[in-house]
Amino acid sequence: MAESIIIVDYDAGNLRSVQRACQAVGVQAAISSDPEAVRQADRVIFPGVGTAESAMTTLEASGLDQALKSFASSGRPLLGICLGLQVLLDHTDEGNRSCLGLIPGQCRRFEFADASFKVPQIGWNSAHQAVNHPVLAAVPDAAEFYFVHSFYAITAHPEHVLAQTTFGDQTFASVIGRDNIFATQFHLEKSGRFGLALLSAFAQWDGR
Amino acid sequence: MLSKRVIACLDVRDGALTKGVKFVGNQVIGDPIEKAKEYYDQGLDELVFYDITASSDERNIMLDVVSDVASQIFIPFSVGGGIRSVRDASALLMAGAEKISLNSAAVTNPSLISDCAHAIGRQNTVLSMDVRATSDLSACASGYEVVIQGGRRPMGLDALAWAKQGCQLGAGELVVNSIDADGMKSGYDVRLTRMIAEAVPIPIVASGGAGTPAHLAEVLTEGKADAALVASMVHYGEYAIGEIKAYLAEQGIKVRTNF
């Protein structure tokens, strides 16, 4: 039986672009908002655009928050993308909201004294790999990816930082993870060949 | 460090790629999807499609183009032209666009910007403004005026004031398009671009007038633009995207060269 890959649908943006990117690397993924489907999946992709506040409210109302926590503890591979990375942390300053708590840490807004650094960060930036990770091994170090965000992750434990990016005078964690969780602040579905390479590597990753 | 972006602009009419000069006389020059794919393979950073279809009956053709592009091209792209409601904007995002670009309808109905920003997010809401130099400094103190309906209707609205207002209403990015420079290949309006870039806290895309890679270098440095839009100079094969980016990198401008 083919592996079941679920893209979590919680009313947070354009999931079809993630699904199309999966198709482009030969991976069939289904979009679902059913908590049970998430619990049972072999692999979960958790994308998202919009605000962390409304995302968390929707996740809690639908029971997807508990399903994601239960999936994360299963050891099966979980991929967070953009807002999907941010809400994995304990807390975000965006709306002062508590989040899923799957990776210890928090999200803060970019604040720059120099007005020439414009927020949100929109565009391509390099991800400098901090560790050897089987998914990141699919792309060269310092490969560029497409970012759109105003908040960034700060993990409580440095070992959860998988890659770093510098925007303005701020260096932040652009890829975070632990055990079976891998999450990117950038949109790998919009990041050309290297983004697709990461998606393909995730689809083959055993979560270890 | 964030790279400066090179964005190709494709004017689409009834599903075909076209190009005009100073917003008029658009000729069919190819297939938008093939062109988009060619640029994607050359390392283009982003695409903009402007739907210049005259009749609203043919809007669905654009949704098909967007959907085809989205299944073959994995870089961000925005779509503008004829977006009058949140519903129009949402339909384009659902078809696969990353961002939508508001123009004329936002000038006549500014709350469209805040409505879109609220419904689809600031970062997906681009305000595109078509601007022309004016000598009427009593109405337009900046010396630039906003013009709508494809360059046909001057609004007596100051370009700088509109840029600030658009930003306050929730636009996540501004495209500043000089009508005077459009299709002339004699360089961007650097003064205009810089004036607006210094006045708003969101990224600025310079548009209109690119003829050589040096024009991009100028507007990305002196003009303080975050991204530069190209059309004629690449559509007719005069320059390749890779060639433009290699030039910018040589000038010490950070661009994405490994892709």
Image (cartoon, coloured by chain):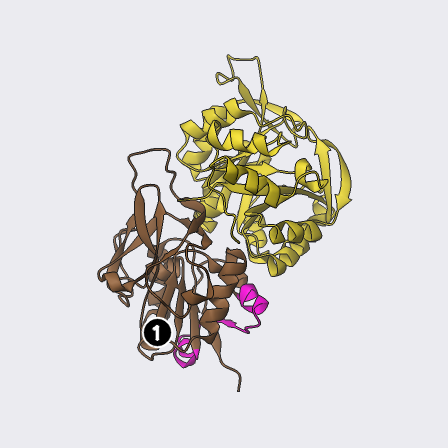
| Residue for badge 1 | A180
SS at badge 1:
loop
Q: Quadrant of residue A182?
A: bottom left
Q: Is residue B254 left or right of residue B89?
A: left
Residue B167 picture location, percent across and down: 43, 35
Residue placed at 45% from the left, 41% from the top?
B172
Amino acid under label 1? Asn
Question: Residue furthest toward the left?
Answer: A156
Q: Farthest front residue?
A: B250
**Along the viewing direction, whichever of B250 and A136 lies nearer the viewer:** B250
| Position of residue B189 measured from the top left corner of the image (x, y, whole percent) | 56, 25
Residue that sits furthest to the bottom in the current view: A1
What residue span does the magenta drawing correspond to?
A19-42
Say how many tags the image has. Answer: 1
Q: Position of residue B103 (x, y in %)?
A: 57, 36
User: Residue B5 placed where, x, y %?
Assistant: 51, 42
Residue drawn at x 40%, y 57% is A82
Q: Look at the image and say whether residue A150 sits in the magenta stretch.
A: no
Chain assigned brown: A
Residue in view at x 65 percent, y 53 percent: B37
Q: Colour of chain B?
A: yellow
Above or below — where is A202 with respect to B243?
below
Q: Quadrant of residue A21?
A: bottom right
Residue B54 shows in this picture: no
Q: Chain of mark 1?
A: A
Q: Residue at x 67, y 54 (%)?
A: B65
